[in-house]
Amino acid sequence: MSRIGKLPIPIPKKVEITLDGKLVKVKGPKGELEQTMPDFVTIEQEEDRILVHRVNDSRKARERHGLARTLVANMVHGVSQGFERRLQIQGVGYRAQVQGRNLILNVGYSHPVEIVPPDGIQVAVEKNTEIIINGINKELVGNLTAKIRAVRPPEPYKGKGIRFLGEQVRQKAGKSGKK
C-alpha cells in the first residue's frame, strides 16, 4: 500500500469538491481547478475528507495511487491557500520589472527578456531583484519558475544568475595565477 496514497485528504471549510467519474472539480475562495484522474484509482468523499483507493494491486495501479492523491491534495491546497515561489537575481546590473502582466528581465544579454505568464499566475517584483510567482495551480507555478530560472541559471564561478530564494550555489575556485 502506498504510504502517500493511503493518507486521507482533509477538506477545509469554504472548499467544495465535485466528483464526476474520473473528473475532480475543486472550488474554493481563490478559484476553481479541475483534473482528470489517472486510470486504476477511485476517489470517494467522506464528510470532510477525500480518500483515494486503487482498483487492484497491479504495478500501474500502485504507481498511480500516490500520484492521484497528491494531485487532489495540491488542488485542495491551491484553491484554499495558493502556491508561491520566490526567485532571487544576483549580478551587477541584473534586475527584473513587471510591465502590465509581463515580466521583463535584464540579466546581461544584449536585449531584455520578456516572459508572459499563463492565465491564473501572478508575477510580482520586490527590490528589483526578487521575483514572486503566485497561483492556485502548483504545476503552472513550478513550470513558470523553472522557465524564468532557465533564462540565466546561476553559474558556479561568480554566482551570478537567477536562483531560488535560499538556494546554495557551490562556488568553484577558477584558474589560479602563475606561481
Image: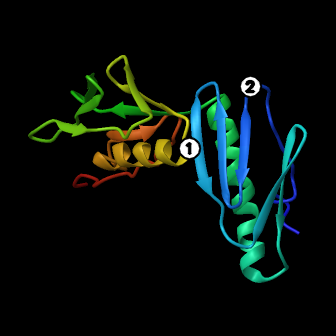
Q: Badge 2: how crowded within 10 Å, few (<14), some, or many (20+)?
A: few
Q: Secondary structure at mark 1?
A: helix
Horizontal side of 161 relative to 54 (left or right) equals left
Is there a contact, CB below 8 Å, between mark 1 and mark 2?
no
Q: Going 75% across and 55% down the picture, which residue do you hit?
A: 69
Q: Label for residue 14? A: 2
Of circles 1 and 2, the one toward us is 2
**Where does residue 74 sit, x and y in percent of width and height?**
66, 45
Q: Residue furthest top?
A: 127
Q: Going 28% across and 53% down the picture, which residue do you hit?
A: 176
* Residue to which mark 1 is pinned: 138
Residue situated in front as seen by the camera: 126 or 117: 117
**Where does residue 144 sit, x and y in percent of width and height?**
40, 44
Could you tell me the amino acid type at mark 2? Lys
Vertical placement of residue 12 versus 172, above or below: above
Horizontal side of 171 relative to 178 (left or right) equals right
